[in-house]
């Protein structure tokens, strides 16, 4: 009966936009999911951030600031990078792509869940979170802190640009939550399923978004890098929880593998889709419920 049950569920899922990758995925669940861990950016939020504010903290020109930002972020696939490049290009229509005053970009590096860095000509540039700046011992003054507080309380994410060890400026982006997010979260909660957020983003922004959606503050884990997300899932599992992880990014892939069921957002990165057991083809969070229902039905048939 096992293969039949799985086939029925797989076919049903496909017709509803839930792609189950091999029978294994549903069987792997064994028990019914009682915890759903959501990534934030691109999973609970639309994932297309827009720049809403920018500020310079050092004596550089607007043109140099944006040229440098473009030079670095043009190499990144991160949605924040795309937002920054788009905004910067509008500010300086004659920008020099990939170059800064004729100098080239070298040693581009990704710091997962924190930001990016490279050499732009002779200058060392970092773009990313406050945590990234701290890890490079870049001083953050009160003016910068205040800019963060003001914007993060509005659920915006701030990103810093450091040039040669000094904060040059900051940019704030907003990324609205998906329209179905709070409905799905409250439905899961009504089924006694614990809802959790794990994110690489900072605590204030994460808390503001969670509150908007209805995820309890004690279930919000911010400033979590890709392996931290795995640790969190393993901790839940060690406490007997059966965990579904929903994510879209490269940074979610290890967690998607670690979870009892990994669910990738269809519009997410290829790496996440490959790592997942289930693909939510329509990229709608409603289908998290569809997938859990399907696995429940399959388990009932199997046992
Ligand atoms: P999430 O887990 O919510 O999807 P990420 O782990 O992708 O978030 O990123 C966490 C944080 O790292 C972002 O909020 C941002 O501050 C910073 N970050 C990561 N990549 C970049 C980048 N390319 N440019 C600027 N900031 C970045
Ligand atoms: Mg994401």
Image (cartoon, rainbow, N blue to C red):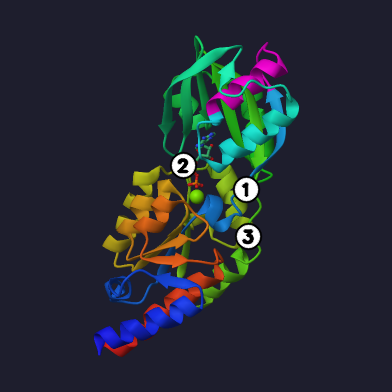
233 inside magenta stretch: no
Magenta highlight range = 56-72
Q: Mark 1 points at which residue?
A: 48
Q: Quadrant of the C terminus?
A: bottom left
Q: Name the residue under label 3.
A: 178
- Asked if residue 243 lies left or right of residue 98, the reply is left
Q: Residue at x 45, y 76 (%)?
A: 14
Pointer 1 local density, CA inside 10 Å: few below 14, some 14–19, many at least 20: some
Residue 195: x percent and y percent?
48, 64
Which of marks 3 and 2 precedes in the sequence? 3
Residue 162: x percent and y percent?
55, 20
Q: In this view, does 31 lie above or below 143?
A: below
Q: Mark 2 points at which residue?
A: 223
- Asked if residue 233 lies left or right of residue 113, the reply is left
Which quadrant would residue 296 be assigned to in this image? bottom left
Residue 197, numbered label = none
């Amino acid at each position: 009966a096992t293969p039949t049950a799985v086939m029925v569920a797989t076919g049903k899922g496909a017709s509803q936009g839930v792609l189950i990758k091999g029978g294994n995925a549903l069987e792997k669940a064994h028990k019914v999911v009682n915890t759903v861990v959501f990534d934030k950016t691109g999973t609970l939020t639309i994932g297309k951030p827009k720049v809403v504010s920018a500020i310079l903290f050092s004596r550089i020109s607007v043109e140099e600031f944006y040229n440098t930002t473009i030079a670095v972020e043009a190499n990144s696939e991160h949605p924040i990078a795309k937002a920054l490049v788009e905004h910067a290009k509008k500010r300086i229509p004659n920008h020099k792509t990939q170059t800064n005053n004729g100098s080239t970009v070298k040693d581009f590096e990704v710091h997962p869940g924190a930001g990016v860095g490279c050499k732009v000509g002779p200058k060392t540039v970092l773009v990313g979170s406050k945590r990234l700046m701290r890890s490079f011992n870049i001083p953050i003054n009160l003016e910068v802190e205040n800019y963060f507080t003001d914007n993060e309380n509005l659920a915006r994410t701030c990103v810093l640009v450091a040039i040669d060890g000094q904060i040059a400026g900051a940019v704030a982006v907003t990324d609205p939550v998906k329209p179905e997010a709070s409905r799905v979260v409250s439905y899961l909660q009504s089924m006694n399923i614990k809802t959790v957020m794990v994110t690489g983003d900072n605590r204030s922004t994460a808390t503001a978004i969670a509150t908007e959606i209805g995820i309890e503050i004690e279930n919000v884990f911010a400033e979590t890098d890709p392996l931290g997300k795995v640790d969190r899932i393993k901790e839940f599992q060690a406490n007997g929880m059966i965990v579904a992880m929903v994510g879209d990014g490269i940074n979610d892939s290890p967690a998607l593998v670690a979870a009892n069921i990994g669910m990738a957002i269809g519009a997410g990165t290829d790496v996440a889709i490959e790592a997942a057991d289930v693909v939510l083809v329509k990229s709608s969070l409603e289908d998290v419920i569809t997938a859990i229902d399907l696995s429940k039905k399959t388990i009932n048939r199997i046992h």
